[in-house]
Amino acid sequence: MTVQTSPELSARKDAAIAKGVGMSTQIYAARAENAEIWDKNGTRFIDFAAGIAVVNTGHRHPKVIEAVKAQLDAFTHTCHQVVPYENYVVLAERLNAKVPGDFTKKTIFTTTGAEAVENAIKIARHYTGRAGVIAFAGGFHGRTFMTMTLTGKVQPYKAGFGPMMNDVWHLPYPNALHGVSMEDAIASLERLFKADVEPSRVAAIILEPVQGEGGFVPAPEGFMKKIREICDKHGIVMIADEVQTGFARTGKLFAMEHHGVAADITTMAKGLGGGLPISAVTGRAEIMDHAQPGGLGGTYAGNPLGVAAANAVLDVIEEEDLPARAERLGARLKQRLAAIADQVPEIVEIRGPGFMNAVEFNVAGTDTPNPDFVKRVLAEALDRGLILLSCGVYGNVIRFLAPLTIPEPVFEEALEILEASILAAKG
């Protein structure tokens, strides 16, 4: 199949929209349902991107749509800080109960993942009276100035945007394939404390349980416990960025559940809203309560439509047992990739918990990343009607983010296309 595009609409886009807003495809969506998208020409695509892990519950899940329509009939916006509403309170109560950690929690709502991270840093600094923040190379936390600074990937996120924010340091993230062990990462933290910043100046350590843009790299067993111990020793706030890993994607509601420790603050977005913009920060009550009234919030923070969608998303995850389905889907995907690995020496690793999976490609028989192979796979897949995304510091990783609700026949069709596309990319 040849991908159908809209040259006239693409030209209008180029004339009207800043080129800094990148696009992975030239598909212009006309409608979507669960794991399928149809463009303006009626061409059907299977969606293995899910809006970058936003529609974990599928495009237009009936329960999410029903909840949003009901809210739309009631009211769309009052600003919770002016006239509050009950479903905001209900969602906060639910997240306080579900976010990992056997301690009293409180929550605030914001609009985007970057805004959630910004507020988490604000709260940690206010609580500790310290300025320093430690993040990790390869991590992605957003595009605002603080979150761009925290992001450990220069291209395309930092290049040309001038000086970054002060008092932020980056450490190597454990990645055995790239020669960084857990011990290496911890040793680099200890060196940082000796060479650059004393622990008593550090407000927070922020990290993703599975790095997203960095290549879908899971934190190794024991790493989160070591970070937790170091934070406890020095009075540092531990922040888990669960913006992409949250809401059943990794086989648990939150990825931190795989590690047996809890962060002090957890940031959430993407899958929480099921397609509507909403994000959240949940943390220890004494930390969350430290900021003065008016210090947190925003005009659209916790918009009623987003809150209604989020409450419905939590219902769907529970009723359809999406964490268990993520485990099953991810296992089948990884098995399918493993079955062709002998035919594709470019495959160097297949990884990821639940249905947050990735495959990494090098030049065959070498340690050299192979982003060109990835580009060929993505193009072959799109020609066949499958939308895929790349990631990784070197652009040599394909990540898989299909909705957790994807119908079985559509999933099997996607696996067939994926296999054919990888084999075709070999030439």
Image: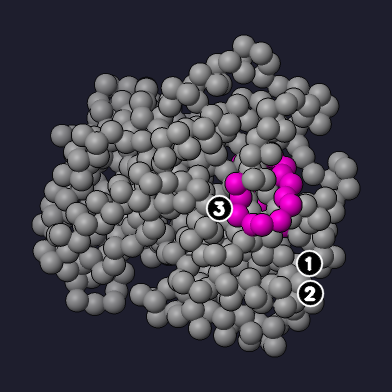
- Colouring scheme applied when the structure was drawn: one colour
The span from disc 2 to disc 3 (Cα, nearest Å) is 25 Å
The answer to whether residue 119 is left or right of residue 350 is right
Disc nearer the start of the sequence (1/3): 1
- Between 252 and 68, the one lying in front of the other is 252
At horizontal 35% and vertical 51% (from top left) the residue drawn is 327
Q: Position of residue 352 (x, y in %)?
A: 37, 59
Residue 103 is one of the magenta-drawn residues? yes
Count all numbered tags in the image, as a single digit.
3
Rendered image: mark on residue 242: 3
142 w.r.t. 351: above or below: above
Identify residue for label 2. Answer: 201
Q: Amino acid at mark 2?
A: Arg
Residues shaded magenta: 98-121
Q: Find residue 364 and report its image quarter.
A: bottom left
Identify residue for label 1. Answer: 131
Residues marked 1 and 2 touching at CB (< 8 Å): yes
- Mark closer to the observer (1, 3): 3
Q: Position of residue 392 (x, y in %)?
A: 40, 61
Disc nearer the start of the sequence (2/3): 2
Rendered image: mark on residue 185: none
